Amino acid sequence: MTAPVRGPHTMSHIDPSLDAAALQTLRWIGAPPDNWVSPHPGIDHDVTVVGSGHTGSTFAFALQRAGIRKLHVVDAAADEAGAGLWRHRARMQQLRTPKNLVGPELGLPALGFQAWYEARHGEAAFAALDRIPRLEWPLYLSWFREITGLQVRYQTRLLRIEPVPAQGLVPEHLRLHLEVAGQPRTETTRKLILGNGVAGSGAPNIPAVVAGLPRKLWAHTSDLIDFNALRNRRVAVIGGAASAFDAAGVALEQGAAEVRLFARREHLAALPVLRARGYPGAYDNYPLLPDAVRWTQALRYQQAGSTAPADSIQRVLKHPQFHLHLGVTWQAAHAHEGQVRAEVGGERFDFDYVIAGTGFHADLALRPELASLAPLAAQWRDRYQPPAHERHEGLASHPYLGLGSELQEKVAGTAPWLQHIHIYNPGGFVSSGLPLGDVPSLRRDVPRVVRHISQSLFLSDWPLHEQRFNAPVPPDFTEALYAHALWQGPETTTAATELATAQA
């Protein structure tokens, strides 16, 4: 059974001029180049992208424009409505990035969020926005996929990856073990892009004190949470970054009797250290910096902490039943009469539910589909040993990526096929300097990865391209086009002139 395929259908018609302008832009830049990648027997796809959110949408558009057309975008969700996190697990009221950042449109304004939003709500409405409203973003992405003709195969989950060695002119590639609409299936691809979200290179970070509680009494912010069930309940939220404040905000808005947020820091993180290197020179060239510099910058970010937007904090401060606890850790917690009894900072609290907004581990071994290759892939601990005062186990477990965000083998010569797997999720943070997959990463890193993939596909097939270079080329025209104008000497010219005069 084949899972549903999404393709272009009836346009949104919010404003007919929007679709007309977008289609005109696509016409002006010309049709996507024909697929130039050499076909090979036994290879189903040239590129497979896991994840259909803004990352998958941007890659599909960029790959098409690069003439890499035999691509495949898959998503484990049942359909478009269930894909991504914006409608379900994301709880902020606005995206955390500026409204005018370049996104999937990659510099084509008629395909961008602003053009879409102004056609829907008007120029004044966009001017009044602080940042992009969360629930508008998936609506825009749906339109972007329609207008660019992106197809997504839903109900498709990646289970395992294994290499297929080169044989003759057939290059090394990957065998993907999939589950498609509940059925096992095997397909092959030359390149794989993991654009699979915040936990795509690891797993949620669950504090041990929470993990030991009965599962019905707690959740991580990455889980689907029934906030309606928390009405009139006492809720604890652990963590001081944006996801923690957003979860607290939704619980309060749904009528929780009390919400207490606990953070280890003495003060809420308020220093946006990434902004200091947001200028084009640093932004565009960051992946070329030495390992020691990139490590120190990643550590500086960790030490400063992830800042919650001011509006996420203001969202909870409006509620008198909200209480903020700083500089505290949970020493113990256990189930007590169907509730959670916690010892925190020398005090005892009883809660009906606990939400951990405690981020994610980046470690490929924690992902079931990547566990078998994890021992072969280089982590930052394998490539760089920081001085003692800069050691950090969490950063050390991040995958060490190449300039195309591709995995590297831990030991040279043992797993060269890992270079065909590109990490495009926050696991690439230490290598790239940005949480890959966030909107700010799209403008710089999607073209960078696509360029790397193009180079690899071309060079690995060089013998075939060399044949193509040297193949017979038919002429644009023959000598008959200009034969009558060939100089034949003065006598011929005089005769031709006399003939023309006589005919006149």
Image (cartoon, rainbow, N blue to C red):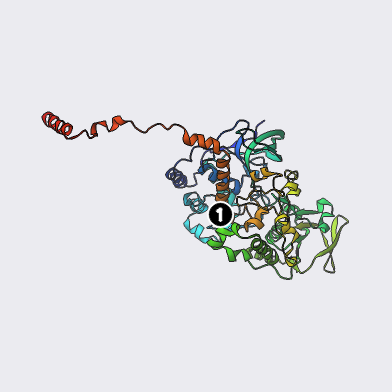
Q: Quadrant of residue 457?
A: top right
Residue drawn at (58%, 45%) of the image: 453
The local crowd at label 1, few if under 14, some if 14 to 19, many if 20 or more residues have their Cα within 10 Å, is some
- The answer to whether one can see residue 239 in this image is yes
Quadrant showing the N terminus: top right
Front residue (pair 371, 408): 408
Residue 196 rendering spot, x and y as whole percentages: 66, 47
Front residue (pair 96, 165): 165
Residue 3 rendering spot, x and y as whole percentages: 65, 34
Residue 261 rendering spot, x and y as whole percentages: 75, 64
Residue lying furthest bottom: 266
Question: Looking at the picture, does residue 165 appear above or below residue 244?
Answer: above
Residue 325 rendering spot, x and y as whole percentages: 76, 68
Question: Looking at the picture, does residue 121 appear above or below residue 492?
Answer: below
Q: Which residue is mark 1?
A: 444
Residue drawn at (73%, 51%) of the image: 202
Quadrant showing the C terminus: top left
Question: Looking at the picture, does residue 329 appear above or below residue 75?
Answer: below
Tally the numbered discs.
Answer: 1
Residue drawn at (57%, 33%) of the image: 39
- The answer to whether one can see residue 255 in this image is no
Front residue (pair 287, 352): 287
Residue lying furthest left: 502
Secondary structure found at label 1: helix
Q: Quadrant of residue 333?
A: bottom right
Q: Amino acid at mark 1?
A: Arg
